[in-house]
Image: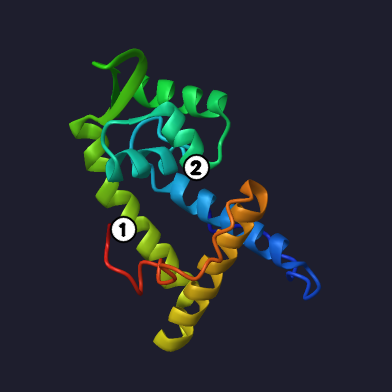
Amino acid sequence: MPQNNPPLDPIPDDIPLAGLISIIYRMRNIYTDAQEIAPGLTTGQIPFIMQISREPGTTQDDLAAHSIYDKGTVARATRKLEENGLLTRTPDPDNRRKLRLFLTPEGEAVVPWVLAIDREWEDILLSGISEDDRRTLCQILHRMAVRSRDTVRKDGDDGTSGDDRCSHTAPLP
């Protein structure tokens, strides 16, 4: 990263929670993109790689439902991932209109890099914060993520299950 950047303005204390989360998210994307994990791979495609890694053979519809992205976004992302040799789309034998998604060996090789970069980013953000506070923060943020998703989806999950989702407090998937 460039070293000759001008000094940054302080982040105001009155930014709402969503604004703070947005800043952290955008900075993580800039940090991740700078790592150049794989040719043509963008941070916007990483959630799809990770979900396909967890669920080989998932469909684009399943990805859209899981990620809360619209079907067009999922189709564009998976097409780019396929063009870049990171996944294959295979017709479902029971329904030829459905395409099953699988990572290629090159796509599988991306997963440990993504996990390592995410751990590195979390280490940077959480430096100087005790393990107990890290665990509490991750639990609270996970409940907030579930609640925000469920508010939009109206699923009714109370957000109390599986609270330890940060890599510092939970085993890898």
2 or 1: tag closer to the N-terminus: 2
Q: What crowding class fits label 1: few (fewer than 14 Cα within 10 Å), some (14-19), or many (20 or more)? A: few
Q: Of residues 93 and 82, which is closer to you in this image?
A: 93
Query: Which mark is drawn over residue 67?
Result: 2
Farthest residue, direction right = 14
Q: Position of residue 150 (x, y in %)?
A: 60, 54
Residue 115 makes an appearance in the image:
yes
Q: Amino acid at mark 2?
A: Ser
Farthest residue, direction left = 105
**Residue in the picture at 76% in, 67% down:** 16
Q: Position of residue 10 (x, y in %)?
A: 74, 71
In the displayed structure, 166 sits above or below 74; it is below
**Residue in the picture at 41% in, 67% down:** 162
Q: What crowding class fits label 2: few (fewer than 14 Cα within 10 Å), some (14-19), or many (20 or more)? A: some
Q: Quadrant of the C terminus?
A: bottom left
**Residue in the picture at 40% in, 34% down:** 41
Q: Of residues 5 and 34, which is closer to you in this image?
A: 34
Displayed quadrant of residue 13: bottom right
List the residue tagged with mark 1: 116
In the displayed structure, 14 sits above or below 21; it is below
In the displayed structure, 139 sits above or below 105; it is below
Mark 2, secondary structure of its residue: helix
**Residue in the picture at 36% in, 67% down:** 167
Whether residue 116 sits left or right of residue 28 in the image: it is left
Q: Amino acid at mark 1?
A: Ala
